[in-house]
Amino acid sequence: MQLEDLMRKPTSWGLLAMLVLTIIIGFYLRNKSGSETQVVSPFRADTRDYYMYAYNLRHKQSYSRDISSLIDVRHPVTPDAVRSPGYPLFLSIFVDGPPDNRTIAKIVFAQMILSNLVLVLAYFLYICFLSDSWAVAALLLTALSPHLIVANSYLLTETLFCLLLVLNGCLLSLFFLRPSLLLAAVSGLVLGVATLIRPGLQYFPLLLAVILIVHYGRRKGFHFVAVLLLGYLVILSPWIIRNLEMLHSISDDTLKINFLHHGMYPEFKYDGLDTSYGFPYRYDPRSSEISKSTTSVLSEIARRFRYEPAKHLKWYLIRKPAVFWSWNVIQGLGDVFIYPIRRTPYQSNLFFRWTHRLMRYLHWPLVLLCAAGSIMVWLPRFNYIYPEKSIYVARFVSALLVYFTAIHVVGAPFPRYSIPLRPFLYGMAVFCLQMFYTAVKSKRVNI
């Protein structure tokens, strides 16, 4: 008996009502949070850099985070490449002057719309590898996720990057259902845009290429991979060429060095000091020496491994994945807030507080289910239970989750960077439950 016989039934009115209600709840939470949340000093740290890039693009036609142009727009600015241009290009649509409440409100409103769109796209992704009822369950978790909701109130990359990841998931799901060179090319273009927002995605196309070649064979798979990578490079090449011409380098290594440096301290603390948690590099008197270059930080990491191998192996292989997928984002007030907030419905609204508490209780069970599902989906036995196309969509989700976990095992495991992956986390956790249910149901039917 096939999976369709066990799980796929015509969509009932009740299930359709649950789907509509779930989307309405998700829209309500996002829109109310976006309109009522107030961030303390929103123009800070990463946000300040992104805003200045957008501002200088509009007023100086130069990609620079130089803040001096806010004081005098005629002041020359120095181009740089510390941060990728994807999110600043998005902000430049709205940034027409110095940061003020009106501009920030416009950006937050746009991100609310993008976040609502994530819900719609997530459902289309889920139904490609989950049955109708399980897909609605995964969508409900995505709709209620406080991390995805609160992220919209910050001028940070999380919301836009999440949208592009889910969009690419939908495109690849369609590709697995009906392979075509056009879908491969469009997927490559979307991956390129997403990489310009978060450079950590840059190696994922290579992993995806391996999956496609294994699935479709060397000849056919190579054609798909070539077109996908071509689309990917079409988006990235202008940024690379600009850096080579202006900076004589493909990219600026500052963030890569910081990424490796900030993640090398066991338990995310400097010498076990509790007050240094999350930001141990600020307490290390040798930080400037360690972060001089990629070579210097790698040499320091190697030295520490030689000195305390067991301690660092535990940190890198066990504790880092746990920190990366943890509930608290470390910055701000902790909990789900990246920067401190002055007001939020999560403090005053009973429904918000209830959904927050529910998702917090479910968090670690969902993470563990996701981890189990990400491994189980690669086992050959499930090829005989699930349609081939569904299993490859699920394997794509697994590959994306494993990839980002591995990247942050190498560098800094800030939980903030797992926020855009929440729709995939919930989808894989529910898929794991569905796999157990299907396996049990299959045995009962066979008996």
Image (cartoon, helix red, strand yellow):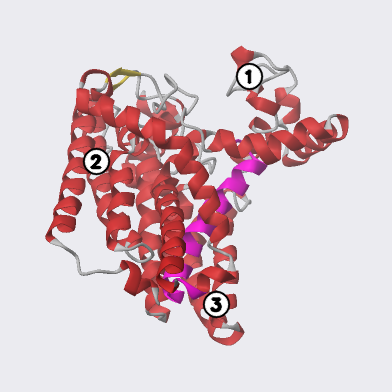
Q: Nearer the viewer, mark 3 or mark 1?
A: 3
Position of residue 158 relative to residue 399, above or below, is above
Which corner quadrant of the image does residue 205 belong to? bottom right
- The location of residue 281, given as percent across then percent down, is 65, 23
Boundaries of the magenta span: 384-412
In the image, taking residue 203 as reference, residue 116 lies left or right, namely: left
Quarter of the image where the C terminus is located: bottom left
Say which amino acid is labelled 2. Met
- The location of residue 278, given as percent across then percent down, is 58, 24
Q: Residues within 10 Å of mark 2 (few under 14, many from 20)?
A: many
Asked whether residue 183 appears in the rendered view, the answer is no
Q: Residues within 10 Å of mark 1 (few under 14, many from 20)?
A: few
Position of residue 419 relative to residue 431, above or below, is above
- The location of residue 399, given as percent across then percent down, is 54, 59
At x 27%, y 47%, the residue is: 114
Q: Which residue is mark 3?
A: 215
Position of residue 194 relative to residue 43, above or below, is below
Residue 153 lies within the magenta run: no
Q: Nearer the viewer, mark 2 or mark 1?
A: 2
Real-space Cα separation, disc 3 to disc 2, in angstroms: 37 Å
Residue lying furthest bottom: 219
- The location of residue 216, given as percent across then percent down, is 54, 81
Q: Which residue is mark 2?
A: 112
- Give me the disc on residue 282: 1
Q: Secondary structure at mark 1?
A: helix
Q: Main secondary structure of the magenta part?
A: helix
Of 354 and 336, nearer the camera is: 354
